[in-house]
Image (tube, rainbow, N blue to C red):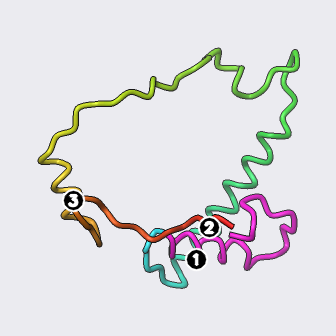
Amino acid sequence: MASSAFPEDKNNATQPQEEVRALARLALLPLSQEETERIAAEFSAIVEYVAILRSLSLPDGKEAGDVAGVDNVLRDDAAREVDPERSTLLVKAAARSKNGHIVVKQVLSYE
């Protein structure tokens, strides 16, 4: 996607709508023009709020993530037992599958 989630030209009203349409295409979600406009407005509000948060000046040079006192909340990346019945249902629910795997469109290009 050529555009950015943090547009520098805030007066360009079509950019968020173009981003929403591109994301909807990737997610295979049919959106009406009304839905696209509503989601684009929400997206813009979120981006503006994040910009405000980024501009905050916190004491002692701390970053916003340091304020809560949480260090690492990520779990270890470890293999887990998979329920075969659940996997089968998931594959059956997918739009396309092959040999028991979900088939998706390529979204990244390797140029």
Marks 3 and 2, how far apart at CA: 25 Å
Q: Give the structural element (helix, strand or loop) at label 1.
A: helix
The kind of residue tagged 1 is: Arg
Disc assigned to residue 109: 2
Q: Residue at x 16, y 54 (%)?
A: 88
Residue closer to the observer: 5 or 13: 5
Sooner in the amino-acid sequence: mark 1 or mark 3: 1
Image quarter hosting the N terminus: bottom right
Sooner in the amino-acid sequence: mark 3 or mark 2: 3
Disc assigned to residue 100: 3
Query: Where is residue 98 drawn, in percent x and y?
Result: 25, 67
Q: Magenta residues?
A: 1-26
The kind of residue tagged 2 is: Ser
Q: Residue at x 84, y 34 (%)?
A: 56
Q: Write down the quadrant of residue 77 in the picture.
A: top left
Query: Where is residue 30 drawn, in percent x and y?
Result: 43, 80
Of the residues tagged 2 and 1, which is closer to the observer? 2
* Figure check: 7 above or below 21: above
Question: In the displayed image of the protein, which residue is found farthest to the left?
Answer: 85
Sooner in the amino-acid sequence: mark 2 or mark 1: 1
Q: Which residue is mark 1?
A: 21
The kind of residue tagged 3 is: Gly
* Figure check: 11 above or below 55: below
Q: Residue at x 46, y 24 (%)?
A: 75
